[in-house]
Amino acid sequence: MCQPATAAVYKVPTKIKSNCSAPVENKIMAWLATVPDGSTVQFGAGRCYGQDGTITLSGRSGLVIDGQGSEFRALTAGGSHRANWRLVNGSNLTLRNMAVRGSNPQGGYDPSIEWQHGYSVEGVQGVTLSNVQARDTWGDGVMLWHGSHTPACGDDASSARNVLIAGALLERNGRQGVAVVDAENVTLQDSTVGPVAWSSVDIETDDDCEIARHITIARNRFGANRYGAIASVGFGGDPQVGDVTVTDNTQTAETGLPGECWAPVRILSPDALYRTGYTFRGNRFLARRNAFEFRRVRNIDVSSNSVTFTPTTGCGKRTGVLLVDSHTVSISWNSFSGANYVFRADSLSTGIIATGNTTG
């Protein structure tokens, strides 16, 4: 009986410094260029590789990059668009067992360098980030975007697709933990995100034609964030943006700076557009004013969530689900502990069913 072929394993050359004493990204890229597609790459176990610029893989297929617990660390301030790792186009790539570190140990936001991401995935068709870490970045821990810009609206072949982020630790990121800007079929699971300067997960296209859809967020822990554990504002409506499922996640620190009143979940469609298909089930969130805010959203399921409300001066009445021009909404068996209302809706919202909820 024929046995399946085993991928060849290539170990990083020992002549490439691995103690973070000097930037080595160019040497790493030169070596990776000699490794054939379909191979497994191994870095030194527990080693440290210094960076001034970006390690870029462009148009590669079937590579497995195994860090074996190594760290890729920014040694300088770097340029405004530096990423630790940038994956451009290509397909079926895996990065595992590695950490990246930027030059932002406080995790603050700086608009001049907010594009310094940990892992920037641009147009890859199939990528897995497994047991990875991204700390101290000025930008996002993980950024999902297109590999090139084309005029196709909502069906751009260069959008990132089939992305799995599992067992990740993303903390002290100066913008988002995970940013879905132009991608579909994205799963974030079993990860810890936060503290981050903006949102733990930001689903936000830059124009109405980019896509952010078919997204699953499951069994994660979300730490401190300013603008939401799950935020989706910005551009885009049906069919470019939507179909998001959020289940069994836990928020461990409140959203917002002291005294601010941002909701942990905000799905706000832009003017004249609607988004469809949002499920929030079995999550544990913390809130000061509203827990869930939906604007121009259809087909919403908010069920079996546990939300603890903390009274905060200046935030006013506390509401489990706030609805603006939203339709076909099921709100069932949620515990909104400390809320004044299970839900509030404006006169445009329709088809709301609320069952078995408590505010005790």
Image: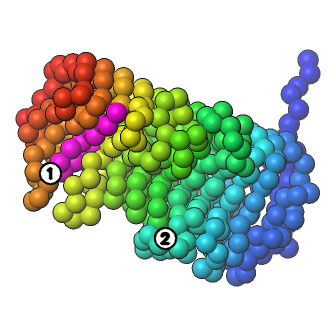
Residue to which mark 1 is pinned: 310
Could you tell me the amino acid type at mark 2? Pro
Residue to which mark 2 is pinned: 111
Q: Can residue 299 be seen by looking at this rendering?
A: yes
Point 19% across, 32% down: residue: 346
Left or right position of 332 against 38 = left
Q: Which residues are magenta?
A: 285-296
Left or right position of 24 against 230 = right
Residue 2: x %, y % from top left: 92, 21
Question: Does residue 291 show up magenta in the picture?
Answer: yes
Disc 2, SS: helix
Number of numbered discs overlaid on the protein picture: 2
Q: Main secondary structure of the magenta part?
A: strand
Residue 71: x %, y % from top left: 64, 65
Disc 1, SS: loop
Q: Residue 103 lies in what quarter of the image?
A: bottom right
Q: Residue 328 lies in what quarter of the image?
A: top left
Point 10% across, 59% down: residue: 313
Question: Does residue 93 show up magenta in the picture?
Answer: no
Point 64% across, 64% down: residue: 83
